Image (cartoon, rainbow, N blue to C red):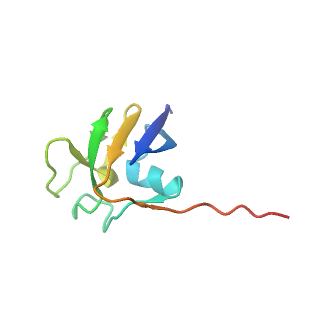
Amino acid sequence: MTRITIEVNGIMVGGNTHQNLLEQLEDAGIQPEYQCRNGMCGACRCKLNQGSVTQGESMAFVMPGEILACQSAPQMDVSIAFDYQPADIKKQVNEA
């Protein structure tokens, strides 16, 4: 497994090359919009500004330069941008 950096709307998070971007963003506490996890709706559409991804089959329409986060696994450091600011959920740490 290769460790990479994912930049989403200016926020940097760690990632890998074996999970799709939607799962990795959720694991990092970022919540992009989505309605499915199989490439049909297109709600997780974003712009790929830098880097490369392996994009799975999808039925949603994407323009050149766009990807679906639910169907795309990064192959190297990537920079993506949503047309909106995804929710950033801070993970709570229990203090004793």
The one of 85 and 58 positioned closer to us in this rendering: 85
- The quadrant in which residue 31 appears is bottom left
Please provide percent x and percent y for residue 48: 28, 41
**Is residue 5 shown to the viewer in this render?**
yes
Residue positioned 32% across, 59% down in the render: 84
Residue reaching furthest right?
A: 96
Please provide percent x and percent y for residue 20: 39, 48
Residue positioned 38% across, 48% down in the render: 9
Residue 28 vertical position relative to residue 33 in the rendered view, above or below: above
**Is residue 55 shown to the viewer in this render?**
no
Please provide percent x and percent y for residue 47: 26, 46
Residue positioned 40% across, 60% down in the render: 86
Please provide percent x and percent y for residue 81: 32, 48
Number of dots carrying numbers: 0
- In this rendering, position of residue 69 left or right of residue 65: right
Residue 17 vertical position relative to residue 29 in the rendered view, above or below: above
- In this rendering, position of residue 4 left or right of residue 96: left
The one of 37 and 94 positioned closer to us in this rendering: 94
Residue positioned 37% across, 36% down in the render: 78
Residue 72 vertical position relative to residue 35 in the rendered view, above or below: above
* Quadrant in the picture for the C terminus: bottom right
